[in-house]
Amino acid sequence: MVRDYTMSTVCSGHRAVLACLVIGTFAISLSNVIIGHLAYNLSSLYQPEEFNRGLSTFERITNLDGEIIYDGEYISHILDGELPFPVNNNLKRLKFRPGSLPLSSAQSLQKCYINSTRYGNQIPDKTVMLASVSDTHKLIYRNIPKSSSSTARHAMKDFFDGNDRRVKHDELELAVHQLDYALISFVRDPLNRFYSSFDESFFRLGPWMGSGPIVADKPRVKKWYFENKYKVEKYPYLYEGLPTIGHFRKVYCPPDELSISPLACNDVPSIENGTLAHRFERFVRDYDGREPFDVHMNLQVSNLVWGVTGNPLPVTKLYNATEADKGWLDIAHEKGVHIPDGQLTHGRRITRRFNVSKVSDATKRKICRLMALDYCCLNFELPEVCRTADDDEAVFCALDKIPKREGDKIDIFDELVIQKK
């Protein structure tokens, strides 16, 4: 039986008009994609029987300027089929806060669906999934850039006998559901990851990748740059006055360190005075989240769904990337693998080049809206700056009720434009 409930991200207002882009939904089995904003009257939500069955044992509802925000535990009971969707012909959406579900990130992900046609630019693999596979330990690791991926690839190769492999959908389903393989990955707070993703992508698409010492002996990197640099040309201000890597380094690297070695710049705090941060903020204002200019800027969730259907991968567990060493030690203990002390950390520990302290709260809130799918589908709590945002800039998740359809065909709503009240 297919339940006609879906969960989606909800963005409120903007300073003029915010096109709340369709970025995904949760679902019990089959789901629909919609983004938007509705308000309900408390008195009309429930028939008495439904209220007693659903809300009487929880703190379910918070009234927020005329809107009703639901308790995540109540939403989870509906998702799990333990409670029915409220009986009301006019009620099609229940809003709740990101991170409020009593579910793990992996459990939340299984309720998630992405419109893979509309967000095709966000999904790196279409018909197959690139993964590191250990047949010895029945372990499959799915890479997510800027989420402790370097440490993970190192761990899989050196301690778990893993090899990179392209895995088809049927092969993965068989391995996880019938052959007892575990599919894992690492995820992190979307706001902090966005900082790191932009920093890495900015470096990778800089004009110094077209010529100069960095690519002198790297023809493939140079070729990749010329094939992809058009993606940043819509943001011409990003590299103004920075034609070479030397110009770029002088902006963020202390002169004493730079005189020793360019590599020394990676280990010391940035000295940039806001020049790079200002460009970052301008980019965030212009960016709609639809066409990332580098794979590092893809949503985390887009790496965890099938590219053809948008349905979630059969993930067994998602670990916290900020505690990657602990996560791998837990995995090693479970698999009977010994990892020597101090042998795990293998990431590129590079100091962030732009000064995050100079990023405004307004920019942070815009990033939270851009990353709404990650916050909702991975059940991450919003950072304080986004949690306390005015309704005008708020991000919510939503459980939607959709009309029944014949067979398995699901209609897709492309976008819903929300105007400032």
Image (spheres, grey):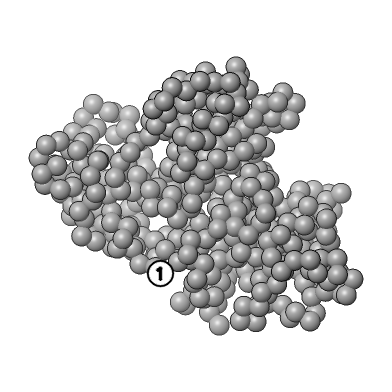
Q: Residues within 10 Å of mark 1 (few under 14, many from 20)?
A: some
Q: Position of residue 120 (x, y in %)?
A: 55, 47
Nearer to us in this view, 393 or 329: 329
Residue 282 appears left or right of 82:
left
User: Which residue lies at the image location 40% right of the left edge and 69% below the top edge?
Assistant: 362
Task: Name the image quarter holding residue 182.
Answer: top right
Name above or below for residue 237 compared with residue 265: below
Residue 279 appears left or right of 43:
left
Nearer to us in this view, 230 or 84: 84
Name above or below for residue 268 compared with residue 73: above
Residue 290 appears left or right of 356:
right
User: Does residue 212 appear anywhere in the picture?
Assistant: no
Please give the count of numbered marks on the rendered protein.
Answer: 1
Name above or below for residue 257 compared with residue 335: below
User: Which residue lies at the image location 62% right of the left edge and 78% below the top edge?
Assistant: 64
Query: The C terminus lies in which quarter of the figure?
Result: bottom right
Residue 6 appears left or right of 211:
right
Give the residue pinned by disc 1: 362
Q: Position of residue 361 (x, y in %)?
A: 39, 68
Task: Name the image quarter holding residue 284.
Answer: bottom left
The secondary structure type at the circle numbered 1 is: helix
